[in-house]
Image: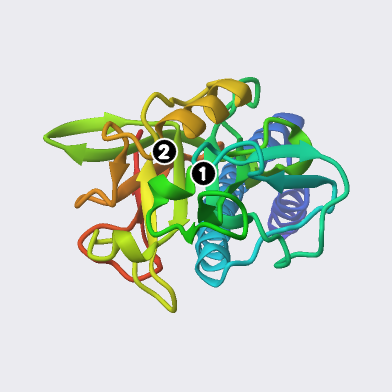
Amino acid sequence: MRRNKNQHILNSSLSNKGYTIVETLIFLAVTGVLFASAMLVVGGQQRKTEFHTGIREIESQLIDIMNDVSTGLYNNTGNFTCSTASSTTNPPTISLGSAPEQGTNAECIFVGRAIQFAPNGTDNEELGIYTLFGRRQVGLPTSGTDVRTLAEAAPDVPTFDQADATLELPYGIKIMSVSYISGLAQERGTIAFTNRFAGNAGSGGITGSQDIDIIAIAGTSLNQTKPAAKNNIRTNITAATSALNPNSGITLCFKSGGTDQHGKILIGGSGRQINTALTIGTGDC
């Protein structure tokens, strides 16, 4: 009887002994690994969500720019002037100075907006947005004839920065390529959205409340300096080497800063309405 009692005491003592130090350390290590794995999963999902949110934000900003061109809306900072008094056909003269109220300039018109992707020194995480102005008439101001084509408008872009806007890409997203297909894939760094002039009707632009054209500017590339991009806009926007409303549309490829994902935004192509098409995939652009 005593032996059974002692055996019961021994068993009870063993069952209440608890964990050894080694067992505790193993438990903590396993728990730590599981916690770290869970955090990696949560963090990875958060970065994916951020990329999806960011790429759609970029798409929305591009649509806003196209809509502004379609409706003739631009940001008049009030600190520059536009005139054509010095010539009957040359591009307008855009200078710093007090500007007239928006919509009242008798010599110049709002032509559209140009977007430079990845200006030099921005690590592919920024867009430069420039306003394009053109002649209102061919001939002397107020006594000539209204322009009917983009070439007659002779569009120009301010050389100074005060009229520019900047769009910083969110969540570390980077622009990796701006391309269209013309036989082979063609790479560019700047595109322009311009109003459709009466003499350009039927050129296959983007249709909406007011037709607009999309142009891939020749001579431009990613990581170009702002002055170089502006000079290419000025000299090449109406050149035959610039792609006007390419049938393939223009594809912008953006890379995620935190995941193995990319997003492609297609603008225009095949008479597409004033909107975009977004696809998200894995891997590089």
**Label 1 belongs to which residue?**
155
CB atoms at circles 1 and 2 under 8 Å apart?
Answer: yes
**Point 30% across, 59% down: residue:** 200
Between residues 87 and 95, which one lies in front from this camera angle? Answer: 87
Q: Which quadrant would residue 268 be assigned to in this image? A: bottom left
Relative depth, front residue between 162 and 154: 154
Q: Which of 137 and 231 is in front in this view?
A: 137
Please give the name of the residue rendered at 60% of the width and 34% of the height, measured from the top-left corner.
Answer: 125
Q: In which quarter of the image is the N terminus?
A: bottom right
What x and y, as percent, mark residue 31? 65, 43
**Image height check: is 192 above or below 176?**
below
Q: Which amino acid does label 1 sit on?
A: Pro
Q: Which of the marked residues, 1 or 2, is nearer the chain's N terminus?
A: 1
Residue 124 got which mark? none
What x and y, as percent, mark residue 201? 28, 65
Locate residue 277 relative to residue 204 in the image: left or right. right
Q: Is mark 1 on a helix, strand or loop?
A: loop
In the picture of the structure, the residue carrying the numbered disc 2 is 237
Image point (66%, 43%), residue name: 85
Residue 263 seen in this snapshot: no
Q: Residue furthest right?
A: 98
For label 1, the crowd category at 10 Å Cα-Cα, with few meaning under 14, some 14 to 19 and many 20 or more, is: many
Which mark lies nearer to you, 1 or 2?
1
Work out which residue is located at the far front of the displayed protein and give it.
143
How far from the left and from the top, in percent, is residue 29? 66, 34
Q: Where is residue 28 in the image (x, y as percent from the top left)?
A: 70, 38
**Which residue lies at the image location 57% right of the left edge and 59% below the top edge?**
143
